Amino acid sequence: MWPRLGLIILTGAIGCGRSTEPNPPALPSPPLPAAKPKFLFPTENRALLRSGGETEFFAPTGPGRPWSSGAFGCVRNTRTRIHEGIDIRALHRDAANEPTDLVQATRSGVVAHINSNVAASNYGKYIVLRHSLEHLQVYSLYAHLSEITDGLKIGQSVASGDTLGILGRTTNTKDAIAKGRAHLHFEIGLQIHTQFESWFRHWYKDGKNHHGAWNGLNLLGLDAAEILRQNATGDFDFISHLSNQPALCRVRIHQARLEWAERFPGLVAQTLRGETLPVQAWEVDLNFNAIPIRLKPLYEEGLKKKAGGVRFELLEVNDNVLREHPCRSLVFKKGARWVLTTKGLRALDLLAWRGEK
């Protein structure tokens, strides 16, 4: 019996010990799917995403000018004029050296405005789309088109990537856009006020508004290149991007209703008090392009009286932001005191517009 018992014990020891067979190789975990980008590039040109690719992405204003003159911001007229979009270079040309690049919707949305009359705008032929994003209404604009897609109509829904037209160089300016500089002027931004047309009639008695509420005076651009860069990772939050803009100044608007706060509630700082109290005024942080990036309702009575009865009160200015972005000229220093310029007052008047007076 002993030999048999020994065999049983030995067999058991082998069965309970560590296996001599190699472990199967560990399979790599499948990568998590990237979040779907909120904005697509409007043309085939994606050189912006390559290190040093700016020179192949932006169309400068002329020979010998840096690529930055085709970027967003205070890049024109020795930093005194804002460029609210980005100028994207053409990649494809026909035998006559005219561009043939297709221009596509950066995001699904609705056609808000079409201008086919080159004489009516220095943007030439252009299209504006309206998009819903994170409970915000955002616009995108595509300008200097040589052609607009047949059948495109105001109010029509478009899908992300749908063809809107062909990149070109149309404009009504005295100096034509040269063939070599043909580009897409592309904007992403926010419309200031839905009642712009009544504001325009009030301020410009004899003025002609060919573009309704989509007049350039009513559109505030953001840096579309920066949005496309951040968005390419698939991790982009528009409200965070907007609220993290550096503030040029803080103003107080002495009125109860502000349409911007109703249209962009995600930018309103909620307070614990005042749920049943009427709003008396708003504190608003503006970026250098006059975009309200943070708003705070105020409930204290008598604020306007304390301010001397003015409608708009300038509370503080970040002069570092002003030095970096001087082109909008919203504020200036009068002696030791900061004051709103005529342009600044006009921007606030449109923001706070309450209808015909």
Image (cartoon, helix red, strand yellow):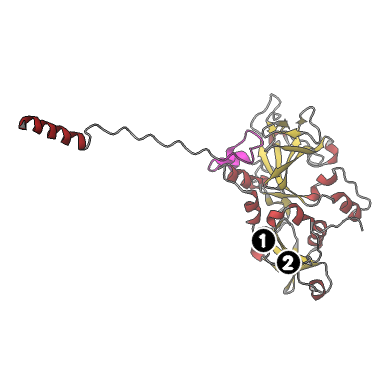
Considering only vertical position in the picture, is 94 above or below 23? above
**Residue that appears at 65% across and 61% down:** 321
- Residue 274: mark in rendering: 2
Where, by quadrant of the figure, is residue 245 drawn? bottom right
- Give the mark toward the camera: 2 or 1: 2
**Quadrant location of the C terminus in the rendered image:** bottom right
> Foreground: 209 or 39?
39
The residue beneath circle 1 is 247
Find numbered disc 1 in the image and state the secondary structure of the residue it sits on.
Answer: loop
User: Label 2 neighbourhood size at 10 Å, few (<14), some (14-19), many (20+)?
Assistant: few
Amino acid bearing label 1: Ala
Q: Position of residue 207 (x, y in %)?
A: 91, 49
> Foreground: 19 or 202?
19
Residue at the far right in the pictured view:
206
Dominant secondary structure (helix, strand or loop) of the stretch shown in magenta:
loop
Asked if the stretch drawn in magenta spans residue 50, the answer is: yes
Amino acid bearing label 2: Gly
Residue at the far top in the pictured view:
95
Q: Position of residue 269 (x, y in %)?
A: 68, 61
Considering only vertical position in the picture, is 246 above or below 130? below
Q: Position of residue 267 (x, y in %)?
A: 69, 56
Find numbered disc 2 in the image and state the secondary structure of the residue it sits on.
Answer: loop
Q: Position of residue 134 (x, y in %)?
A: 67, 47
Residue 284 falls left or right of residue 200 = left
- Residue 322: mark in rendering: none
